[in-house]
Image (tube, rainbow, N blue to C red):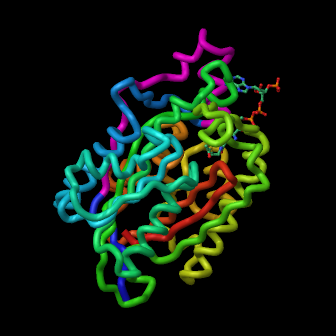
Amino acid sequence: MIRSVVRGIGASLPRRIMKNADFEGMVETSDEWIAQRTGIRQRHIAADDETTASLGEAAARAALANAGLTPDDIDLIVLATSTPNNTFPATSVEIQNRLGMRHGFAFDMQAVCSGFVYAVTTADLYIRGGLAKRVLVIGSETFSRILDWSDRSTCVLFGDGAGALVLEAAEGAGSIDDRGVLAASLRSDGEHKEKLFVDGGPSTTGTIGHLRMEGREVFKHAVGMITDVIEAVFSQAGVTAQDIDWFVPHQANKRIIDASAKKLGIADEKVVVTVNLHGNTSAASVPLALSAAVADGRIKRGDLVLLEAMGGGFTWGAVLVRW
Ligand code: ACO
């Protein structure tokens, strides 16, 4: 059977780093409060010349270089983002143009923080369905542009950045030992819209709007939802928590990550954490964390890697990949 195998990975972060202490004086907060409640120490914030498209392009180029490929080798770009450069055209098409691609096709996916998990699952289906051989899957966000910088309960949590994977069709035996995407589970439930949303949009206010979140409410649901889809993926693939080499969760809050790993019985040393460095970069958080763990040699070819995310909508999902 055809499998979607990871051929390359890359990341891109804005030049400017904003430390927790930089918020002191802007809103009533402290480095101690932010670090204790979330695990976040710093985040990258895009300058005017850094956009979702430019960061996404840089991550895509890094992933292509890592794969030893050029844009000519790519058939499809799937971009997960909730902060597109424009309402339309899709930012993925802009990235396609920036890469000089005059062939193939590109589209955006909008599942907020779960966007990258949705995008990997979608790209896998395009590959297995024979519509594409090589797909650039990108998560790129500039959440700094939709934050209310006077709201201390949200502005300290998010950051900007991008990460990308090249997925490639390869022959597999159909077993759990195959490399590539092995199982996935996606969910959404619009009942929770008011707990995490942006209060603007083209069809309602005609404005971009600002992110609004009832943090405590999101927190309450997060661990249960995350662990449900992970257990669905485990049962699809016939594996247990003990078989996982690396757990790469959405990087929203260290307390949610720790509680999810504990509930699943995944050892601390198998959990990849970058929320301290990047904050919550929404759809970019999982590929940024993956990229860090590949770059420092933790994730190696053949490792069983569990991805997970949960975000606005609510949306949530998990993917199991053998690297
Ligand atoms: N500095 C100081 N105090 C603050 C800050 C701040 N930055 N922000 C809030 N507080 C205050 C609150 O006003 C509150 O004060 P009060 O008790 O006087 O009312 C107090 O701190 C406690 O607030 P809580 O919201 O109860 O704090 P909590 O421990 O729940 O932590 C947090 C807040 C970090 C937001 C947490 O709830 C969380 O991480 N939630 C989940 C976020 C998440 O995972 N989002 C999903 C993905 S995001 C996406 O999809 C876009």
Residue 158 is situated, as x and y percent measured from the top left of the image, at 55, 34
Residue drawn at 18 percent across, 61 percent down: 72
Residue 204 is situated, as x and y percent measured from the top left of the image, at 68, 39
The answer to whether any part of residue 179 appears in the image is no
Q: Which residues are magenta?
A: 9-38
Residue drawn at 40 percent across, 39 percent down: 52
Q: Is residue 193 found left or right of 155 in the rendered image?
A: right
Residue at the extreme top = 25
Total residue callouts: 0
Residue drawn at 64 percent across, 42 percent down: 203
The answer to whether any part of residue 121 appears in the image is yes
Q: Quadrant of residue 26?
A: top right
Residue drawn at 23 percent across, 62 percent down: 103
Q: Quadrant of the C terminus?
A: bottom left
Q: Quadrant of residue 157?
A: top right
Membership of 13 in magenta stretch: yes
Membership of 17 in magenta stretch: yes
Residue 5 vs 74, above or below: the answer is below
Is 193 in front, or is 237? 193
Q: Is residue 9 found left or right of 153 in the rendered image?
A: left
Displayed-image quarter of ligand 1: top right
Residue 119 is situated, as x and y percent measured from the top left of the image, at 47, 61
Q: Quadrant of the N terminus?
A: bottom left
Residue 213 is situated, as x and y percent measured from the top left of the image, at 71, 37
